[in-house]
Amino acid sequence: MIDEKEVDLLLNDLLEVHGYDFTHYARASLKRRINRLWSLDKFPSFAEMRYRIRSDTDYLKRFVEELTVNVTEMFRDPIFYKTLRTEVLSTLAAKPFIRIWHAGCSTGEEVFSMAILLKEANLLHKSLLYATDLNSEVLEAARKGIFALAPMKQYSENYILSGGKKDFSTYYTAQYGHVKFKEELAEKMVFSTHNLVSDRSFNEFDLILCRNVLIYFDKALQERVLTLFNESLGPLSYLALGAKETLKFSSIQPKFKQVENEKIWRKVN
C-alpha cells in the first residue's frame, strides 16, 4: 500500500512534470483512489508506479482519470431539479440569452438533464450550455450523448419527480443496451476541458452548476473555486451545488441568498 510520503511524491510529480495539481484534493479520498490503482495494476514496487506516472503518457492518462471522480446520473436529487424548473428557469426566462456552465460535468448526464428542462420551458433555443471537466475522456463520452440503457428506469422516475410531464423515452432512442439522446438537445452544448484548480473564468454566466465536485477538495481549494464562480456570475444569477455542499462559512456567502432551502443560491450583492 502507498503511504503518506509516497502520496506526496506522486502529487509533486503530477504537478511538476505534468502540471496537474491535486495537492488540495481531500487527502483521504485521494489516497484511497491511488491505493485502488496500486492494487488493480499490481506494481512490483512504488518506484515502478512512480516511473510509469512520470514517463508513460498512456498510463498518466489512466491515473488522472482514476483520480478524478466520474459518478453522476440524470435528474439526480429530483426536488433540486423541480426548484430549477419553478424558481430559476422561470426567472431566467426574461433574459434575451441564457449562459449556463456545468463545471466538472463528468459524463454529461446532468447537462442533458438541464437541456431537457430548458426544452420543456421553451428556453433551449436561446441558451448555451458550457460543459467542462478536467478529464478529456469523460468529455468525449458526454459529447456523444450515449448512455447505458440499464439506469433509464431510475432516470425516468427522477424525471417525473422533478416535474416532468412527458414520456422520458421520447428523448432518446435505444439500441444494443445503450440509448442515444436527441441531437437537438446537444446542439446548444459546448464541451471543453477546464481545470478548476488552475484555470480562470472564461465567460459571464446566468447559472453555474458544480455538483458533488467540491466535496473532493480541501477547504482552501473550495474557497478558491467558489471565488472563481462568484467572479463568473453576473448580477442576480444563480449558483447550484451538490447535496452535501454549501456556501456557509465561505467568503462569498454574504453575496448570495439561498433559494427554497435547496442547494441553489442567487447572487444578490
Image (cartoon, rainbow, N blue to C red):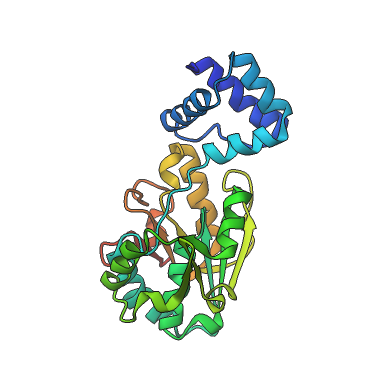
| Residue 92 occupies quadrant | bottom left
Query: Does the rendering let one see residue 109?
Result: yes
State which quarter of the image contains the C terminus.
bottom left
| Residue 168 occupies quadrant | bottom left
Q: Residue at x 41, y 67 (%)?
A: 268
Which x, y percent locates residue 194? 62, 52
Q: Residue at x 32, y 64 (%)?
A: 153
Residue situated in front as seen by the camera: 225 or 9: 9
Q: Is residue 187 left or right of residue 72?
A: right
Compared to residue 51, the image places residue 233 above or below, namely below
Q: Is residue 94 left or right of residue 140?
A: left
Which x, y percent locates residue 157? 28, 67
Compared to residue 25, the image places residue 256 above or below, namely below
Residue situated in front as seen by the camera: 121 or 182: 182
Compared to residue 181, the image places residue 61 above or below, namely above
Q: Residue at x 72, y 35 (%)?
A: 57
Which x, y percent locates residue 46? 59, 15
Compared to residue 170, the image places residue 215 above or below, namely above
Outermost residue toward the front in this view? 176
Which x, y percent locates residue 202? 64, 61
